[in-house]
Amino acid sequence: MLSKIIKEKDIKNLGKKGIPHAVEKQQLIERANWRTFKPVIDYDKCIKCGMCWLHCPDAAYDFNKEGFPVCNSKVCKGCLLCVEVCPVKCISVEQERGKLHKK
């Protein structure tokens, strides 16, 4: 879906100015030590639209060689916005091992 938008709008180069949360890899902050839930992607349902990558406030998503999104669990703080914006609901929530969620 993202590639379709880029093609339709004839966008040649987004650069880092076109992506509000773009940072260099070495600038990513590891902050997942307190997270109790994490996103899990069902690649059989994923349509590679890039909405999770586009909306992630932590820049925790990247893409593998096949074009599927991959979440960097060391950077993801667990806001789960990706779960909400996924148009095909292929991202679910999984509890972190050894961590309890207190109500």
Image: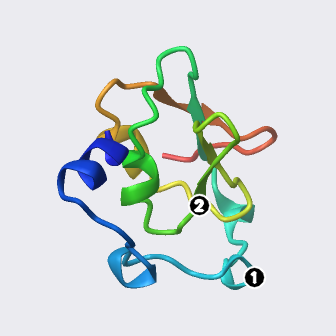
The percent coordinates of residue 22 (x first, y second) are 50, 77
Whether residue 58 is situated above or below residue 50 in the rendered picture: below
Give the CA separation, mark 2 to mark 1.
12 Å
Q: Which of these two is toward me, 7 or 96? A: 7
12 sits left or right of 37 in the view: left
Left or right, 55 with respect to 30, comes to left
| 14 sits to left or right of 61 | left
Q: Amino acid at mark 2?
A: Ala
Q: Residue 60 — which label? A: 2
Residue for point 40% across, 39% down: 83
Q: Residue at x 43, y 68 (%)?
A: 57
Q: Which mark, by number, is residue 26? A: 1
| SS of the residue under disc 1 | helix
Q: Is residue 80 visible?
A: no
Image quadrant for the N terminus?
Answer: top left
Image coordinates of residue 78 in percent, x first then y, are 54, 54
Residue 94: image quadrant is top right
Residue 62 lies, in percent from the top left, at: 61, 54
Name the amino acid type tagged 1.
Gln
Residue 63: x, y in percent? 61, 48
Going from N to C along the chain, the mark reached first, 2 or 1, is 1
Residue drawn at 65 percent across, 34 percent down: 66
Q: Residue furthest right?
A: 98
Q: Evaluate if marks 2 and 1 touch, with contact meaning CB atoms under 8 Å apart.
A: no
SS of the residue under disc 2: loop
